[in-house]
Amino acid sequence: MNTEPDQKTTRSGFVALIGAPNAGKSTLVNRLVGAKVSIVTHKVQTTRAIVRGIATHGAAQIVFVDTPGIFKPKRRLDEAMVTTAWGGAKDADLVLVLIDAERGIKGHALALLENIGEVRQPKVLVLNKIDRIKRDTLLALTAQANEYAAFERTFMISALDGSGCGDLLDYLAQKLPEGPWYYPEDQLSDLPMRQLAAEITREKLFLRLHDELPYSSHVENEKWEEKPDGSVRIEQVIYIERDSQKKIVIGKKGETIKAIGEAARKELSEILEQKVHLFLFVKVRENWGNDPERYREMGLEFPKG
């Protein structure tokens, strides 16, 4: 029996998510894809480059583009991330504008809406974290947001528990243009597994240290060796900008880096479906925020000037 969708009826396209930092974009992408493709922490700006998560919904293949949060840049890395986010939106077939309903429309969210007119693609408003807000407030937020742009539809969802996400998927599957799929049916992301492995360790780093460590820290794979017994040996380096940060990452008697490594190894073992031997090292790489090569590795364009 042929389970492949009829080629005449398939739809496919790119849907970009834009929003202020911590609006819940990465959580929503993971929810809609049904698997972890983007790291999630409470620390702002953990998504740096564009990450694509692929959802198959009926005969439609929806390629979600999770972009860095949009905010007022203060340094070169900030500028690169914001430029990447706006670029991701302008290249998509459809744009989801995600607003944290609990925070409301102010600060970064307000600045985003004030500039949304620069994006000419069809736009859909998505109010997230609705489980914490009264309906009257949600309706008022919807009216306020629509003063800045002509949104085609508004969806009220909770990325955390999945409320409203099924309706959103149904809508997107119908709105995308007809055409063949871009990726194989079982592919969930275009992020290489080795890059995802480094991102997972970076997530655990942020979750463990919270505000103690600047988000300019970076994780790179140094070695990836498939062993004869079916396990994999992974060596990663956590790069920080100052020597004073090294003690923070390692912790007293190495407890902090041990806990980070254990959390990352556990999740990597589940994703890779094989035993993982993970070894973490900490090195200082001063002023890496001004190194063009680091930006290329993260999929960001190095800002001029």
Image: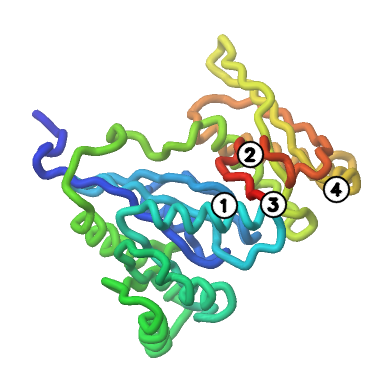
- Residue at x-position 34% and y-position 47%: 63
Measure how far apart labels 3 and 2 are at the Cα level. 37 Å
- Identify which residue, 161 or 296, lies in the foreground: 296
The amino acid on which the numbered mark 1 sits, given as a three-letter code, is Thr
The amino acid on which the numbered mark 4 sits, given as a three-letter code, is Gln
Give residue 125's position: percent from left, percent from top.
36, 71
Which residue extends farthest top?
Answer: 228
Measure how far apart labels 1 and 4 are at the Cα level. 21 Å
Residue 226 relative to residue 158: left or right: right
> Mark 3 or mark 4, which is nearer to you?
3
Q: Pointer 3: residues within 10 angstroms few (<14), some, or many (20+)?
A: few
Measure how far apart labels 3 and 1 are at the Cα level. 23 Å
Give residue 3's position: percent from left, percent from top.
14, 34
- Whichever of callouts 3 and 4 sits on the residue coming sooner in the sequence is 4
Q: What residue does disc 2 label?
A: 264
Tell me whether the residue at label 1 lies in contact with that at label 4, contact meaning CB atoms closer than 8 angstroms.
Answer: no
Q: Pointer 1: residues within 10 angstroms few (<14), some, or many (20+)?
A: many
Q: Which element type, helix, strand or loop, lies under badge 3? A: loop
Q: What residue does disc 4 label?
A: 245
Q: Which element type, helix, strand or loop, lies under badge 4? A: helix
> Where does the N terminus fall, quadrant-wise?
top left
Residue 291 relative to residue 199: left or right: right
Q: What residue does disc 1 label?
A: 47
Tell me whether the residue at label 4 lies in contact with that at label 2, contact meaning CB atoms closer than 8 angstroms.
Answer: no
- Residue at x-position 16% and y-position 34%: 4
- Whichever of callouts 1 and 2 sits on the residue coming sooner in the sequence is 1
Q: What residue does disc 3 label?
A: 305
Residue 257 relative to residue 274: left or right: right
Measure how far apart labels 4 and 2 are at the Cα level. 20 Å
Residue 257 relative to residue 65: left or right: right
Give residue 299's position: percent from left, percent from top.
55, 41
